[in-house]
Amino acid sequence: MLSPHFRALMDTVPDGVIVIDGQGTIQSFNPACERLFGWTAAEVIGRNVKVLMPSPYQEEHDQYLARYHATGEKRIIGIGREVTGLRRDGTTFPMELSVGEAQQDGPPAYIGIIRDISDRRAAEQALRNREARLASIIETIPDALIVIDGQGLIRSFSPAAQRMFGYTEGEVLGLNVSMLMPSPYREQHDQYIGRYLATGEKRIIGVGRIVSGQRRDGTVFPMELAVGAVDLEGERLFTGFIHDLTEHQAVERRLQQLQAELLHVSRVSVMGQLASALAHELNQPLTAVVNYIKASLRLLERAEGADMPLAREAMDKASAQALRAGQIIRRLRDFIAKGGTDRRAESLDGLIEEAAALALVGARESGVRMELRLQRQDLRAVIDKIQIQQVLLNLIRNAVEAMSGQPERILSITAAPMATPEGAAFMEVAVADTGHGLDDAAMARLFQPFVSGKERGMGVGLSISRSIVEAHGGRLWPERNEHGGATFRFTLPLLSESEENQDA
């Protein structure tokens, strides 16, 4: 028999408490059990506890007790486990069951503590459903998703990332994410994470940018990278979403080719119009020049003193007409040079990195190794981004072609601030190669239009590049470097602190 004190304790316990004897007969059934199972204590006391269990627990329960009495082997007694309970109305529910043996004189008794875990199971199922939905989303998104920790070690590698880089998830988990990057990004990556964790300074985190990735087979491809930081269970993790730009760049290159062809046709048309305009505009002054010179020659042939003022006047008029012809040409040149540009304050480091990534598409197959040296000061200049990137693309492509067939092929891109003697601040960008170099004749003719060192070149790239740089207030010039190759340098005026503040 249970003491009144023990019964009073059982009545106040929030969990269900059942006491059974050695045959499994219910001796006590507290109010919490009545709420859980829907039976009153009077209805179940004296009945076998199996009435509270669905199959197969009903059939197994007596075996557990008999085996325990015979051998001492614990299948339920002394062990907590999750089982299923059966309510009076026939519904079932998950419950956590802990069974202990009561120490008393006389026949053995067993106390079962029961906790309804329906809410916990529902929460766990909801979590599994969310995880399954998230996994389904990650499985189907076309962009790659990579999760890394604060040490740069890969924690998750989506199916799209596996297809993009050629590795399985098992091959990369636990390895540093820098394995997916070519130089110089590989050497710089851990520095970015360390600096961000130490100072909060964002170089990649929270910023979308174009960089280069390296596949398992060693090929390099342009990609757009967006990185975010997240705190998960007290740990800082970084998520990277990657979009392969290879196909996009191929389409863009084709569009550029079509645009170039269209521009070529347009230039031919404009040149025809200009030729007609020049012929019409220059005909009159040039005809006058010829007539004045012929008249001067006739006056000079007579060699009479009275004719000398007339000859001088005729030559003055010829000179004036020649100047008029020159003015016509200058006006036409100024007209051609005019054109709107979209200039704004741009970060030069990011611009250079994007241009390098785009220009080196396919360069790995040429055996070219790139060295990118930037000051990382986030210096800015008011520029037309597309035009300056076109200058860089032209210089980089020229450098790659110049190194064709060379035993050592190193492309170096350096950017550093500089100041003129007058105190003006500029950014100097240098593109250096280890190619065949430039002789004196080539140096003298580099910027002449329609003069090219390439077999199929039109000879306008450097000329246009210099015009773009000079239109931005800088200059472009070539040098021979210590490796025997060529270095092309150009400068761009930087924003002053007052201009930066005004722009901000």
Image (cartoon, rainbow, N blue to C red):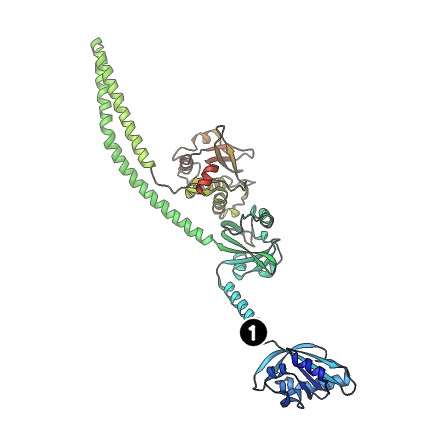
Residue 495 in view: no
Position of the C terminus, as image quadrant, is top left
Residue at the far top in the pictured view = 305
Which residue is rendered at x = 20% and y = 9% of the image? Answer: 306
Which residue is rendered at x = 77% and y = 82% of the image? Answer: 103
- Residue 336: % across, % down: 32, 36
Which residue is rendered at x = 21% and y = 22% of the image? Answer: 291
Residue type at mark 1: give it: Ala
Residue 359 in view: yes
Q: Is residue 400 above or below residue 334?
A: below
Q: Is residue 259 above or below residue 104?
A: above
Q: Nearer the viewer, residue 431 or 65?
A: 65
- Residue 390: % across, % down: 43, 42
| SS at mark 1 in the image | helix
Position of the N terminus, as image quadrant, is bottom right
Q: Nearer the viewer, residue 236 or 308?
A: 236
Q: Is residue 320 above or below residue 98?
A: above
Q: Is residue 359 left or right of residue 280?
A: right
- In the picture of the structure, the residue carrying the numbered disc 1 is 122
- Residue 145: % across, % down: 53, 58
**Mark 1 Cα shell of 10 Å, populated few (<14), some (14-19), many (≥20):** few
